[in-house]
Amino acid sequence: MFSAFWDAKTARVLFTSLMFAFALAFLYGARETLTLFLFAILFAYFVEPLVGSLSRPLRGRTRAIFATSLILVGLAVGLSFLVGPRIAHESKTLMTSLPGLLDRIASGQFLMQMGQTHGWTRTRELQIQQFFMSYRTTILAYGEGFIARLQAPLTHLWWLILIPILGVIFLKDADEMARGVVSLGSTVTQKNLLLGIIADVNVMLGSYIRAQMILSALTGIVLTVVLAIMRVPFAFLFGPLAGVCEYVPVVGPAIACALIFGVAFLAGYTHLLVLFFFLGTWRTIQDYVNAPRIMGRSLEISPIVEIFAVLAGGEIGGVVGALVSVPLLAILRILWVRLSSTDSISTPALAHQ
C-alpha cells in the first residue's frame, strides 16, 4: 500500500516542491544582494540607448560603454557640486528638527497654536490636547519608526558606486547571458520559445524602465525648481525624493505629495493653498499628459491592476517589492501569453528588434 502511494511521480512532485521552497528561502535570505543586482539591471537598461548610439561612431561596444561611463561620472560630479551641499544641509536640518516636530504633534501643541490663530474656544483646545496626550506614546513610536525608515538608505550609500560597476558588466555580457538562456532549450521549438520570451521581456523592460526614468527626472527637476522658487521648506531634498518616488506607479507619487505637503504644514509654511494647487496641477499634467505620451503601452496592464500589484508588492517586500511588482507582473503576463499561445512555436518578430 505504501509503494502504491509513493510512486515516481509523487517523488518528483515532492522533490520539485522542496526545491521551490529552498529557492524561495534563498531569495528571501539574499534579498539585499538581489536588490543590488536589480538596481544594476535598471541602470543598464537606462543607459543602453546611449551605449547603442555610441557603438557605431566609436567602433565597438566596449568603447561605447567606457565613453558612457565617463559621461555619467562627469554628470554625477557636476550635480554633486551643484546641489549636493544643499541636499546634505537640508537632510541634516530635517533629521534634526523631526523629533521636535513629532513632540509638538504628539503633545497637541501644534494644533493648539493653530486653534489660537483661528479663534478656537479654550474648551476645544483642551479636548484636542487631551486626545493627543492619550495617544502620545503611539504617535511617537510611529514617528520614530518613520525616521528610522528615512535613515535606512544611508547605510547603503556604497551601492551608488557598486551599482554602475555591475551595470557595466550587465551591458557588456547581456548578449552572452541571453544566448546561455536560449541554449537551455533542448529542441528548436524550445529555443525559439525562450528566444521569444527573452525578446518580449527585453523590449518591455527597456521601454518601461526608460519611460519611468524620464518621468522621474521630470518630476525631480520640476518640483525642485518650483518648490525652491516658492520657498517651500526642504525643496532641494523633497524635489529629488519625489523623482525617486515617481518610479513606484500610483502609490509613490501620492506618498511624495503627502510628505511635501505634510512637512510644509508642520514647518509653518504660509502658502499651503498655493502648494496644494501646484501639486495637484503637476500630478494632473504628469498622469494624463506626460505619462501616456512617454509610457505608451509598454506594459498593457490596467491601472487598477497596477495599484493592486504595488500594494501587494509593498506588503510582501517593502519598498523593493513595490518597485518590482509592476514589471514582474508584466513579465508573468508575457510568460502566460507565450506559453498559452498556439503561435509560440514560431520565432517572434520581436526577437529581431
Image: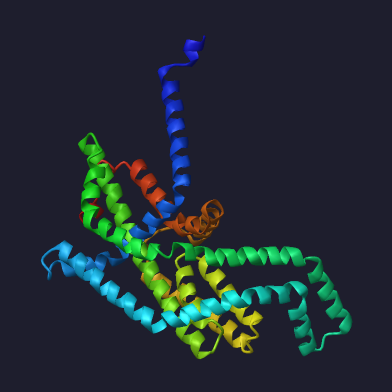
**Does residue 132 appear to the left or right of 297 in the view shown?**
right
Specify the farthest residue to the right. 123
Q: Looking at the image, can residue 259 be seen?
A: yes
Tell which of 271 and 349 is nearer to you: 271
- The residue under the point 47% across, 45% down is 29
Tell which of 349 and 255 is nearer to you: 255
Looking at the image, what colour scheme do you see? rainbow
Q: Position of residue 309 (x, y in %)?
A: 51, 55
- The residue under the point 44% across, 81% down is 85
Specify the farthest residue to the left. 59
Q: Looking at the image, can residue 295 be seen?
A: no
In the rendered image, the vertical position of residue 353 relative to residue 28, given as above or below = below
Which quadrant holds residue 119?
bottom right
**Does residue 104 appear to the left or right of 69 in the view shown?**
right
Tell which of 61 and 26 is nearer to you: 26
Specify the farthest residue to the top. 1
In the rendered image, the vertical position of residue 87 relative to residue 327, given as above or below = below
- The residue under the point 75% across, 84% down is 114
Q: Position of residue 171 (x, y in %)?
A: 25, 59
Q: How many marks?
A: 0
Q: Quadrant of the C terminus?
A: bottom left
Which quadrant holds residue 75?
bottom left
- The residue under the point 32% across, 53% down is 201
Q: Position of residue 147 (x, y in %)?
A: 60, 67
**Does residue 197 appear to the left or right of 316 in the view shown?**
left
In the rendered image, the vertical position of residue 36 relative to residue 190, given as above or below = below
**Does residue 333 appear to the left or right of 278 in the view shown?**
left
